[in-house]
Amino acid sequence: MTAQEVRLCGLLLREHFGEVVEKVGTHLLKGGAQNLRTIIHETGISLDLVKKSLCVLVQHGACVFRSGRKGAGSPAEYQTCCDRILRILRYPRYIYTAKTLYGDTGELIIEELLQRGHMTMSGTIKTVADRLTQNMEEGRSMDYSEVSSAFFRLVETHFLQRCPPLAGAEPKDSSTPAAPAPPGTPAAPVSTAPPTPESFPDCYKVPHVTLVGRGKRQLASEDGEDQRNAKKAKMDSQTHGDEGICWQVNFERFHLHFRDQAIISAVANKLDQTSSEIVRTMLRMSEVTTSPTATCTKPLSANEIFRSLPTSYNIPRPILDQYLTLLIDDPMEFVGKAGESGGGMYVVNMHRALANLARATLESVVQERFGSRSARIFRLLLRKRHLEQKQVEDFAMIPAKEAKDMLYTLLSQNLVQLQEIPKTPDYAPSRTFYLYTVNQLPTARMLLQNCYKTVANLVERRLFESKESKRLLEKSQRIEAILASLQASGAEPEQLTEVEEMITAPEKQQLDALRLHINKLDSAENQVDETIFLLESYINSTASTS
Amino acid sequence: MAGRGGGRGRRMMTFSVEAVGINRGDSLPPSIQQPTPLFPVMEQKPLPLTVGEEEEYLLALKQEFRGAMKSLPCFIQPAAAHRDVERYSDKYHSTEQTDALTDWTPDWKRLPKELRVKKPSRGGVSAAVSRSDKLQSGQKKKKVKEKEEVLLKLETLQKKEEGQSSEDEEEEGEEKKKKQEEEEAEGEEEYDEEEFEEETDYVMSYFDNGEEFGGDSDDNMDEAIY
């Protein structure tokens, strides 16, 4: 956990869960595994609030607990990991993907699960049905079965998974596991790494749930009545046969989907639409047969690809072969040839594609910050690995003075490193070669930390801007509420304009400017997160292979 | 030893200057005497953000998500909310916020036992737990009794105000009202916050702090008890 990651996690926790959870969360991030008493003592927050915060963190998967290291009977220890909290940045993208793939129902299911951390299937379906019914016209309501079928589809394609049961975490709980058939590890010693949800065989098994009904529309009534209705709905808690089985969003699956999308759009940008369709078909065919950490997909024969191509594209067989040859010869190396049988066996090289995408990101960063000539030097060093000062000037075709200047700027920013190769055992300067070089992986890590710092700065600036104009925002909210209530009770237009004029023109301008700034900052966070995703995927893929 | 011979002059550096490219007679850039400025001037302006339907939708999703999280029970606020000026309405406002969706019971089987919060605290995490917990029924009865006392007081005050023309009717009405209030009290037990122990004379939902436009709720004050 670097300082930048901890800072960003703190800000995200503050925005989504409040300041108390932020304090507890950052304390856990900085301090490693701790038990309850230590946390209370060191943060100085009251016992109740710390307990609640820990509940919230565990509910959302940000914190894991296990029995203490000092043997059975010692208090439970809590540990937080940065990764899960940093995913919060990507939530809008997950929800939008669910919408494109599974429509509004899928979108709401994912949104509910992200808001609550994890929920039972029946709870999710009921809440989503109610929300959908709210937005439908009067008299129509959403049937539970439609929402159930959307849920099934999400589980089938592994976008949702069961929360792992707590085998071994609490010794007293081992007799009542939530899933029907516990995996064979209850007697095993507590392993150091928490078990992944996928290590349990029932991860994607949908329980049999008896859920019949339709969504309930919340009547627009007095607030008191509304809450009483809501409470009555919760009082009649029927058991639906799936108590204790909680579902959570499977982020890894979404990440695979994003990775595939990135590869397809890169091919579309570099070559053309048809080649991207071919790559999309290949990726779709290997969705289930390829493991998430595989270097490349399983080999697919050209005949199979031809059969699975969408018919709307009408690509004849010889054209397909030509496209495949083009894809293989492309320097980006997205597609490779693995054999000659079946008309040619082709694979999509995942790791190489990610490495190339990361490299393109690094090059574009250098280009935008230092200019296209510095970018040329950077690309040169990436390609040729080690070059002397003189060689850089010659190959890049840039005058010596300027090349020197640019190299030193890149060196001072740590994008380029200096490698010394001595001719003699004492590193005498006159008898040593000094070579410039670029290492892609460390540079990618450094840029990733820069991205985290960027997002943290954006969040802080946004909070600062809202705090500065807090009074103005509150005033505008109050006036909107007044307007809404007046309109609901049918007031005349003069009254409405009178209320609207309570906000003066310069204030309105200020409000508009504020809104514009906040939208820009939010949008920027979303877009930096796309870069973060690329760099993270690249770093994880190289870390797993090396 | 190797470097001493060549470094008689003032320009001595640990590496050979020719190799790195600074020839004799070239002027070095001026040395920097202070920390770099906080916001250095950028030679290259950054690219503008991509705008499009997808980006706008993502933006809307993000802002809605943030707003929704603020109203969920997961959002824990410390008890003291600071306002710039203390207002009379603060006493009555704080309950409204804690009521809304605070009956969230986490699945206690998935959490270690030490995190279980038994007593009904102000945050109300266990408000739902207390509903089903039989130990709390004793407390419930106490609170209902307190409420009845308060309501009795109210009745007597009302009697004094309105005169005692129809005593019998009022007594019957009183009993009916008591029963209604008992039912209301049970339904309203979720509102059992400390506010009610403070002997408020006014029912929650009829309170108007005068900040709303069209303050015609004053008329309802006398008929607030139903």
Image: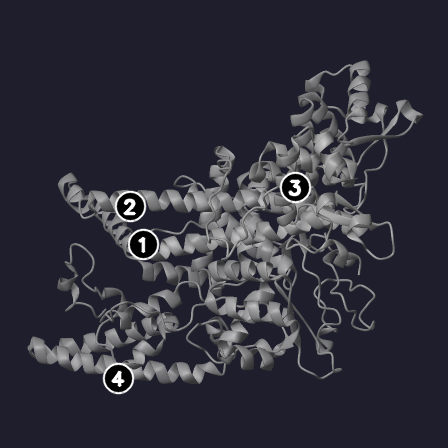
The residue pinned by badge 2 equals A510
Residue density around tag 1, few if under 14, some if 14–19, many if 20 or more, within 10 Å:
few
Q: Position of residue A214 (x, y in %)?
A: 50, 48
Residue density around tag 2, few if under 14, some if 14–19, many if 20 or more, within 10 Å:
some
Helix, strand or loop at mark 4: helix
Q: Position of residue A93 (x, y in %)?
A: 57, 44
Residue density around tag 4, few if under 14, some if 14–19, many if 20 or more, within 10 Å:
few
Helix, strand or loop at mark 3: helix
Q: Quadrant of residue A199?
A: bottom right
Do pointers 2 and 4 mark residues of a single chain?
Answer: no
Please indicate whether residue A195 sits to the left or right of residue A96 in the image: right
The residue pinned by badge 3 equals A407
Discs 1/3, front: 3
CB-based contact (under 8 Å), mark 1 and mark 2: yes
The residue pinned by badge 4 equals B149
A38 w.r.t. A192: above or below: below
Q: Quadrant of residue B226?
A: bottom left
Label 4 marks a residue whose chain is B
Residue positioned 57% across, 77% down in the render = A39
Q: CA distance from mark 4 to mark 1?
A: 47 Å
Q: CA distance from mark 3 to mark 2?
A: 44 Å
Label 3 marks a residue whose chain is A
The residue type indicated by label 3 comes to Leu
Say how many tags the image has.
4
CB-based contact (under 8 Å), mark 1 and mark 3: no
In front of the other: A311 or A399 = A399
Per the rendering, the mark at residue A469 is 1
The residue type indicated by label 2 comes to Gln
CB-based contact (under 8 Å), mark 2 and mark 4: no
In front of the other: A4 or A436 = A436
